[in-house]
Image (spheres, rainbow, N blue to C red):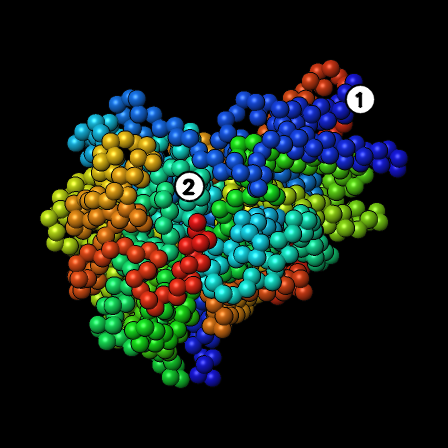
Amino acid sequence: MTKFTTRLPLIGIGVFAVLLLVVAPAVLSEHWISNLGKYCCLAIAAVGIGLAWGRGGMLVMGQGVFFGLGAYAMAMHLTLETAGPGALPGFMILYDPLAPLPAFWEPFRSEVFTLVAIVLLPVIVSAILGYALFKRRVKGAYFAILTQALAVALAVLISSTIRETGGDTGLSNFKYFFGYVLNDEANKLMVYLIAAALLVVCLLAVWQFNRSRFGELLVATRDAEERVRFLGYDPANIKLFAFVVAAVMASIGGAMFVPIVGIITPQEIGASASILMIAGVALGGRASLFGPALGAMAIGWGQSSLGSSWPEGWIYILGLIFIFVILFLPMGLSSLFDRAKGLIRRSSDEPGPATPELREVVK
Amino acid sequence: MLNTSRRRVKTLLATGAIAATAALVLSGCGSRADDATAAAAGSSCIDTSGDTIKLGFLNSLTGGMAISEKTVSNVLHMAADEINADGGILGKQIEYIQEDGATDWPTFAEKTEKLLTQDCVAAIFGGWTSSSRKAVKPVVEELNGLFFYPVQYEGLEASPNIYYTGATTNQQIIPAMDFLAAEGVKTLFLAGSDYVFPRTANAIIKLYAAELGIEIVGEEYVPLDKDDWTTQVAKIAAAKPDFVFNTINGSSNVGFIKAYYDAGLTPETTPIISVSIAEEEAPAMGHEVTGNYASWNYFQSLDTPDNPKFIEDWKAYPGSSGVTSDPMEAAYISLYLYKALVEKAGSFEVDAVNAAAAEGGITFDAPEGTVTLNGDNHHISKPGHIGRINADNQFDIVWESDGFIEPDPFLDGYDWFPADVRDALVASAG
Amino acid sequence: MDELLPPLLNGTALGALLLLAALGLTLTFGQMGVINMAHGEFIMAGAFVAYVTQQVIPSSDLSIPLALPLAFVVAGFLGLLLEVTIIQWMYRRPLDTLLATVGVALILQQAALQIFPAQGVPVEKPSWLDGQIDVLGYEWPLRQVFTIVLAAACVAALAAWLKYSSFGRRIRATVQNRDLAETSGVATRSVDRITFFVGSGLAGVAGVAASLIGGTNSQMGVQYIIPAFLVVVAGGIGQIAGTVIAALAVGIAMTFFAYWTSGSLAQVLAFVLVVIFLQIRPQGLFTVRTRGLA
């Protein structure tokens, strides 16, 4: 029985993987596959937020920064690939056809460099930022506001460097994805499957992490940082690790967003985009394994479907989701599931372990 | 302990690798860049069997640009109602699907794809910012759809799948510069929002100014969503230019005009000529904008045969703002232009519509006058007008171009525009 | 000096506007720990009050002075409503107030877009704010002087109220040690409500000032919220003196950056500078030592 319950998440991931990788391509139209791919990208970022915020108590309000690093790294590569060897991207010609390619674009011609950068760039940035913030014991609202300010700053910076980055219009019009023609049904399916597979991998990684000693320490740091310190651990390092992992996941989500959606703009990484990423995590359940991913997908789906049929209403619904979930279900919809599980356990008189999901995060 | 955790990591890696490989294998049949058979044009799914025809309207109804785009959406509804009351297009009633672009360019791309592949609309109407058009462009080109764009823009673009019913640069910016030259302006200050339209427009203005012998004494940009212009206006006051060329878009204009008025600058000393302030926007700036200039093709005050009816109809339309403006009128034109194209082609198929356009001779008696579609670049001929804002937030026409101006998006007819830039742009667009 | 004077004065006025936007937050965030992301929309509400007042009393010479207390009351009641319906259940979860109020902000923005003309509404400046005063050869717009005077008046009134009124003492007591205050007979619930009323009301006053500077529309609040929070954080939580200095510093720095570089880059530099400053001094400019705040 115990063995079964500890294996339950793994079975869940397996079912989820089959649904995403086998069932969805079989039953969904091309349009909905591409939408689902987009939700997967947002879900990848959300899984990371779930780790940093739900497990680690760090409200990361600026994940757009890392989403943007991955997305722009990928978009720069695809733009150069589309332009062809030696050629300038179309938007740069508009401002100065004779000027050379900006130096920081040049390495993104390489496929390998791009892939490495998608992982390494967020590691470097989040490590520096996280080290500075956590060592100075910046936390809570301060941390949230500072990360949000950085997301705004990066979005404005990209908007204002129109020749170097494409500005507010962003980068779009990609024709190839690592040699594959993007305008091809089979290749679109491939890009979707990569994103879905990456989401499954991220879920597995977080599941593994949560089971590890480090995962336990992270939750302990969230609930009683001082006590963890007294026990001889440095909470800063524990938080830093979770923050870096979350940043990498956001970056991977951003990188896959580009070939699937076909465009990246500073808006997708700014303040409201960063907050929208949080919305899904809060809805699904910040501390649970599946909550962030499913919540992000639900928000994405709501935006495509309700946002279409009733745009004004969707904004109100989104606002109400924030209010009601936070007010009545602070641990998200997944806490309903846990409560139900708790009820079953109690009725069968089996003492279950106190799940961290049920505990309120009290500062 | 150590061993188990290591084993776990291995399991994790293996699962990841399997999933990734599966993804790659599953799709090994996709075409590569070097395949000759690559670019497959999307097949059309337009349904013409019933007695209705579906059209898509794509405007931001939420988010920051909703302040401008809601009106365009409304006027499109009015035009559709009018056409329907008049018998529809080729005898089919228009059934429009309104989508929200939500001031988010990827959403514009996503909704375009949805309208074309899910709803199978025959054409899409809407967009406002150049960024939204640039997001839609690759999608309509890939899926071979039609997009009608109703706002003045920076030019240097011509897509076979887009029809531009707003002005290109030689129909708005260049007439404005001709007006300034005629006024004897010697020094000019450029103020704009920080995005593609002002940046490109100003690049063109600088080239033409050099030709006209007008000196550019300053150039300032502020982010689109920022209202505070005090620092930049202080620079304008210090530079004392003869005129200010204003390419600011949206509500940031209000902050600019207020800072300008606060600093004691007046239309008498330092007049402004704007390309994004119309009858819709002027009321939000109160009397402080009075006396300044704007360059448009259409003004509510234009005295043309078809303008009074347009104004009257709009005033009576539910949800109307009570005034008409250039982007609204261009949106109104776009739907009628589409009707004319389809009726000439006798078909809703995209290629047939484009063929009808290429044949030429498509005209529409618009509120701004009779406009003619250019079949090569999909823009329309327009009259250039300069208006001066009066106390009722209407425009007194003070200058007009010599007849209708043919659209010239790549400025082929202007030798001061560097040929290498034009060639590079045309090459990169293709 | 001639070069530096205009940005210095413009920057001071921008700082005063930031200060007005942030002042209410020193109460709701600083004193109560509530992160109200709808504060920007309360600023918007204040601006719309200025517009509505002007529709009733067309003379802007009278309507603007009248709009100031009205906006205070309207925004204050909006805040009170927010406190009673949502915030009061979350005092032990400050981070969650942030997310819940994001929802409130979204709803208020969309409501304003649908209630008022989408393009925004005009708010006319009183004629006694027309013109400039000569400061060492620079024609300083009177409206900027007005923003500074208004901000100074609000700071003085708030500081005096907190320091000298019995109510101010009760707020300070509640902030420093809620349990002790309660056992000493302070009705902490009503203290919370009135603090929130005043904090939100100050956003309304900021809204009237903002309506004279930029556009009055559904999106106007968005541009103030992040800078306002940064100012409060940099100033030191709950410290009015710190907020004043931080607001002026950010305003002046931003203006100089805008003067030397560009309007966009100025914002980036200002934000990054505040983040770096907080690396050096995480507690902000000034700190208060209490037993109540963790």
Residue kind at label 1, given as amino acid type: Lys
Subunit of label 2: B
Helix, strand or loop status at disc 2? helix
In the drawing, does residue A97 fall left or right of residue A195?
left
Q: Which residue is mark 1?
A: A3
Q: Residue at x 55, y 51 (%)?
A: A84
Point 55% across, 64% down: residue: A100
In this view, the residue in front, C84 or A280, is: A280
Of discs 2 and 1, which sits in the foreground?
2
Residue closest to the eye, C1 or C199: C1
The residue beneath circle 2 is B141
Task: Return the mark for residue B37.
Answer: none
Chain bearing tag 1 is A
Give how far across and how far down residue A36 sits, in percent.
54, 32
Quarter holding the N terminus of chain B is: top right
Residue at 36% over, 50% down: B158
Residue A81 appears at what percent x and percent y?
Answer: 57, 49
Lateral position of residue C245 relative to residue B53, left or right: right
Q: Secondary structure at mark 1?
A: helix
Residue B255 as seen in the image, left or right of residue C242: left
Residue B402, percent from left and from top: 17, 62
- Residue type indicated by callout 2: Glu
Q: Residue at x 77, y 20 (%)?
A: A4
